[in-house]
Amino acid sequence: MKEQFVNYIQSLQDTITSKLEEIDGKATFQQDLWKRPEGGGGRTRVIENGDVFEKGGVNISKVHGKLPETMQQYFGVKDANFFACGLSLVLHPKNPMVPTVHANWRYFEMYNAQGEIVDQWFGGGQDLTPYYLFEEDAKHFHRVCKKACDKHNPTFYPNYKKRCDEYFYNAHRGEGRGIGGLFFDYCKVSEEMSMEDWYNFVTEVGDSFLNAYVPIVEKRKDAPYSETNRAWQEIRRGRYVEFNLVHDKGTLFGLKTNGRIESILMSLPPKVQWVYDHQPEAGSEEEKLVEVLKNPKAWT
């Protein structure tokens, strides 16, 4: 399974980066191959200062070795080894009318002292973080997510949409990071689903990503915007940074497993503001967004 999924994410990385370069028309992805001293490595691709994408990364990693003590305590195991691979992407567009997007698809195995697999699971998802709320864009993104889920189980979309709203939540702000999408984790063998079934589901979601995001980018990338719009984008990006550094489990796992810091923190936007006690103007488009972040909606 691990070889099968590694091959998939390598191919998906090529597909996604090629399409994004085509959309941007100016910037291209810089590739960085790296190795992890404890075992494994990855292929980082970063795009910066483009006509469409101000900063973005589409990264794959394949790491293995002894599970760090802090993670052994987290999983309740001793002397365990692990293998983890995945594709993680974050795109921060230049135009405030284009949403930031995040996606991740991953596979994990854990082994006992004899090298036998004692646990394995898939995880991942994709979610949208707009700066200005266009309801037709939100509905499109969620429709694509639902279609991918419904091919495998009609309960997946409502369950994973709810988990996404709960996970990507800045509790200290009382608001969601964005308008959600899908979030699933610890997808293990059950009476209903084999690991091959989970592989088929996760790859279905991965294959749906460009269909979910690209039409939104193409619709909004040339929209006019003001310096006020740009300042709001940078303030909202600050909330994005807060979530990733305070709450995100993937960031925590990377830091605690001596992951590559440049790849882990590529999710952070290049220009951000923190304005003291900033409140959007009553009745404004900015307030409209915040209201939805505080009260998640059903988009399908």
Image (spheres, rainbow, N blue to C red):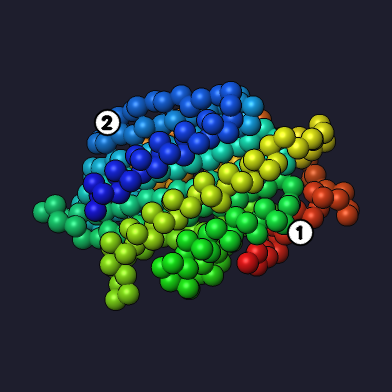
Callout 2 secondary element: loop
At 44% from the left edge and 43% from the top edge, which residue is drawn?
Answer: 88
Decide if residue 108 is in sight here.
Answer: yes
Q: Is residue 33 above or below residue 82?
A: above
Q: Is residue 131 above or below residue 203?
A: above
Decide if residue 169 is in sight here.
Answer: no
- Left or right, residue 179 beside residue 43: right
Image coordinates of residue 258 in percent, x first then y, are 35, 37
Residue pushed farthest bottom?
Answer: 191
At 27% from the left edge and 59% from the top edge, which residue is drawn?
Answer: 120
At 79% from the left edge and 55% from the top edge, which residue is drawn?
Answer: 288
- Left or right, residue 30 beside residue 271: left
- Left or right, residue 2 beside residue 130: left
Q: Which residue has dot 2 on it?
A: 37
Amino acid carrying mark 2 in the image:
Pro
Image coordinates of residue 233 in percent, x first then y, are 72, 39
Between 213 and 261, the one nearer to me in the picture: 213
At 44% from the left edge and 51% from the top edge, which residue is drawn?
Answer: 206
Image coordinates of residue 46 in percent, x first then y, are 49, 29
Between 258 and 210, the one nearer to me in the picture: 210
Amino acid carrying mark 1 in the image:
Glu
- Label 1 Cα crowd, 10 Å radius (few <14 / some 14-19 / many 20+): few
Lower sequence index among marks 1 and 2: 2
- Label 2 Cα crowd, 10 Å radius (few <14 / some 14-19 / many 20+): few
Image coordinates of residue 30 in percent, x first then y, are 46, 24
Which circle, 1 or 2, is nearer the viewer?
1
- Left or right, residue 166 beside residue 130: left
Disc ID at residue 291: 1
The CA distance from mark 1 to mark 2 is 46 Å
Quadrant of res 254 = top left
